[in-house]
Image: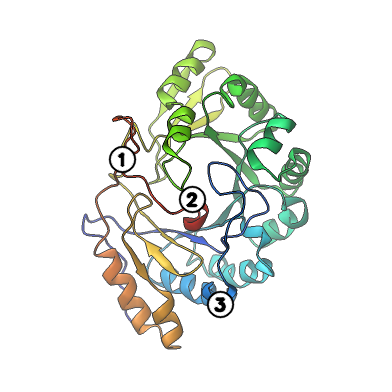
Amino acid sequence: MDHAPLIDPFARPISYLRVSVTDRCDFRCTYCMAEHMQFLPKKELLTLEELDRLCSTFIGLGVKKLRITGGEPLVRRDIMTFFRTISRHLETGALDELTLTTNGSQLARFADDLAALGVKRINVSLDTLDADKFAAITRWGRLDQVKAGLEAAKRAGLRVKINTVALKGFNEDELFDLVDWCAAEGFDLTFIEVMPMGEMGEEMRLDQYWPLSDLRARLAERFTPEELSESTGGPARYVRLAQTQQKIGFITPLTHNFCENCNRVRVTCTGELFMCLGQEDNADLRAPLRASGDNTALIAAIRAAISRKPKGHDFDYSRQTVAGQMTRHMSHTGG
């Protein structure tokens, strides 16, 4: 079988795969989903067996880090079956890291199982520590449920990174509260600029846009941020706060094109492979998956797609219109 590693046209090895296992979620965060989302018919979604086959094929082609996303991955029925089967690649050493991004609502149920299966770190999306604001932005979420999930994750020994979308006029006044809370809890923290995805209306996007350069300047009024040279091959740039030794990340898709060393691709829950989060170009992997029990056509489709991976993306707010705006919702591609 063809096991040569995946290398894109810019000589970047593809070692990181993000896979959405569902488009469904128990929240309706305003910057991610419409309140009344039309979810996909079940037959369009990859089955858990197909997801395993797909991920295992990528691992066979050199993927070392696998991140499971959604929607909310932990609301997918029987998702622990998938984690159980895919964790075999951690045991053989073929996979270095299995992780997930979650809203935290289901962690009280699943944190122990995830830790037992070899998950070491998780990312939890959380934009506010104010229960009323949390209910407003998630529409259906309850902050105490998420906090209980985070406690369960800590008890299970999972390292937690909090991902916070910087939203002007929403969580600006919580900057130091969030930093202090993460320091007290032992959580890492990454701030993310709001991205131009989904049909939210341009006005709302531009009103919400809080450039991280401004956030960083505000942080520096109280702390001494020391630049860290480390990169996970991903979009985040990190600093360490001298006073607390906390690691703070910044993901700035709009003010800094972070694509030079991109090592990742994304697969949606319907088997579309996106070579870049900020481009519409994608490849259908569901058809070759379903056409044959043999992986030859699937591998050929993956290789053909990787050969089209672009150098970078094109998000831009600077012209006061949302250029490069994606029409699909963030929940569709899995963050």
- Is residue 288 visible to the viewer in this orientation of the structure? yes
Residue at 23%, 56% (x, y): give it.
Answer: 11
Query: Spatial distance from mark 3 to mark 1, Cα to Cα?
Result: 34 Å
- Is residue 193 visible to the viewer in this orientation of the structure? no
Residue 46 in percent (x, y) is at: 53, 73
Mark 2: give few (<14), some (14-19) or many (20+) Cα within 10 Å: many
Q: Which mark is residue 229?
A: none
**Which residue type carries mark 1?**
Ala
**Residue with the mark numbered 3:** 43
Residue 53 in percent (x, y) is at: 50, 77
**Which residue type carries mark 2?**
Met
**Residue with the mark numbered 1:** 323
Q: Which residue is at the front of the view, 198 or 191?
A: 198
Q: Which residue is at the front of the view, 227 or 34?
A: 34
73 in relation to 55, above or below: above
**Residue with the mark numbered 2:** 330
Mark 1: give few (<14), some (14-19) or many (20+) Cα within 10 Å: few
Q: SS of the residue at dot 3?
A: helix
Judge left or right: residue 314 versus residue 74.
left
Which of the two marks, 2 or 1, is nearer to us in this view?
Answer: 1
Q: Earlier in the sequence, mark 2 or mark 1?
A: 1
Residue 113 in percent (x, y) is at: 72, 60
Q: SS of the residue at dot 1?
A: loop
